[in-house]
Amino acid sequence: MLRAPSLQRLCAFGLVLLPAASAQAQFDPSKSWVEPPAIAARFPDPPVSYATPGFRAGRTDFPSHAEVLAFLDELARQSPNVRVERIGMSQQGREMPLVVLAEQGRVDPARPTVMVIGQQHGNEPAGGEAVLALAQQFATEPGSALLKKVNLVLVPRGNPDGAERFTRVTANGIDVNRDHLLLRTPEARVIAAATLRYAPQVVLDLHEFTVGGRWIDKFGAVMKYDGLLQPATVGNLDAAIAASAQRDYVDAIQSAFARAGLQGFKYHTTSGGKSDDRTVSMGGVQPDTGRNVSALHQAVSLLLEVRGVGLGRAHFARRVHTQVLAATTVIETAAKQGPALMQLTAQAGQRAKADACRGDLVVEAWQTPAKQRLEFLDAKTGEDKAVDVDWRAAEPLKIVNARPRPCGYLLASSETVAVQRLQMLGVRVERIDGAAPWSVERYEILSQADGQRQDARGAIEDGEAIRSFRVRLRHGRAVVQPGSFYVSLAQPLSPLVSAALEPDSQNSYAANRLLEIGDDRLLRVPGPAPAGVWH
């Protein structure tokens, strides 16, 4: 079996650390939208305060990367429960810290692990600040008492370069939160390596949503909710994982919001720059976001977005508090569930493994069209405003392409890029030692055209054309040569394998030019593999 690269090896590929700026170089307060007083009055500061760098007295910007690193290092010096690991480098050479909180800094594999990811989008600073607040909260009593029941793994900044420049995307223009299957960015690879190393049972991804802007253009309204939530919604998701995410976690967060006087709802967004497009969509249903890829890792996975993009520092304490409250609820729930949570995720992996060679798998799915009444605030008066919209629901999924699930896939020896990406995700890949005839299914390409990946907001920000395939399967036989690779679906991460290797979806490795499918370079294996072809 080929081994996945280690965290240390990923670190070795990093660049030299750049000097950190003293402040966010591209955050410009003059570009922030100023709410009318009637709207601002509806969002008072919370009854708590935080002592993280973003709340330094007199602050008019957000913390630099150097400030974040210094804060975490000091926290680790003060508490034996905190360990700060440098797990990799961003594209511009900034260290990506991982904060591990566990009793005496030692992760106990008998306890559930919760991962919280902040600031994958650099212009959404509340998530990064909330992760720092969480680290501080659980480093010492009374918060650290919960570390007797749960391990915490925190990623303060999933996009350090974007955070420093106050831009959504990474330095090469890729949205890291659409890169968790393709792994084209070092930032996504670092998160994948941390996921592989710590195997969290729960993942919470922290973001901020646009408050005005497109909502004013389309509806004359602004967003009214403090927090919007969505569990994983993706094809081939384990049903028990999905049920627990909603019942045990989303519902618990909504209850916590209500008790705290915060308003929550299901996540929704709309396209930018198209004032005549009044369609509103729930979050994406593709296997590319941190939320959905984490769920295909057999973890309970959630997205929280808070009211923030475009506001500058307005309501920053409330935005951070909303995320801290939600994350604390998630952590407390995981600690309470304990062994039951670990059993839930382990059994999901075993079901995925047992499903090899049987049933159907989802190749491509989209949101389901519906109607929905949404609550906003009038952009001028601040009064409640109800709007009926064309809605794209993430539950249930609209399945547009499905086919029988094979036992596995064969890749030619030339397809090392795809193999390496699968291994980074934690997928087991076997190398074929001896030539042997196999019963296979070939992908016959019926058509191929250039296209662009899409999500709930429209075209995905990466600027790269994909290959849109239409294929059909042809049964046959092939003599598979030594050096080829076999990827069995009899493993817990089989949903990730199919998401990457079935070529006719926008997320596949073939569509995104990481894998070729002609000349038998990618084959499906409908039955058991021949015996003795690898060791």
Image (spheres, rainbow, N blue to C red):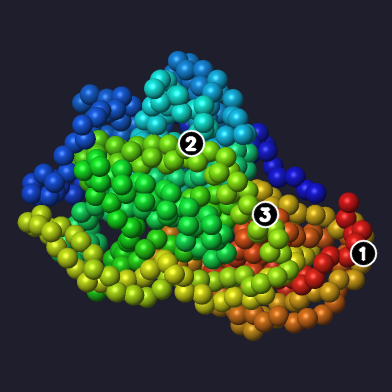
In this picture, is 39 found above or below 84?
below
Going 12% across and 50% down the picture, which residue do you hit? 39
Q: Give the residue type that dot 1 points to.
A: Ala
In this picture, is 85 found above or below 269?
above
In this picture, is 298 found above or below 134?
below
Locate residue 130: give its quadrant: top left
Residue hosting label 3 = 350
Q: Give the residue type that dot 3 points to.
A: Gln
Q: Are marks 3 and 2 in contact (CB under 8 Å)?
A: no
Image check: 195 left or right of 233?
right
Locate residue 204: give its quadrant: top left
Spatial CA distance of label 3 from label 2 is 23 Å
Going 42% across and 55% down the picture, which residue do you hit? 246
Locate residue 276: give its quadrant: bottom left
Residue 490 pos. (x, y %): 73, 59
From this viewpoint, is residue 447 visible?
yes
From this viewpoint, is residue 96 visible?
no
Image check: 418 left or right of 54?
right
Label 1 or label 3, whichever lies nearer to me, is: 3
Image check: 156 left or right of 38?
right
Q: Give the residue type that dot 2 points to.
A: Ala
Q: Residues within 10 Å of mark 1 (few under 14, many from 20)?
A: some
Spatial CA distance of label 2 from label 1 is 50 Å
Residue 495 pos. (x, y %): 62, 60
Q: Residues within 10 Å of mark 3 (few under 14, many from 20)?
A: some
Residue hosting label 1 = 435
Residue hosting label 2 = 335
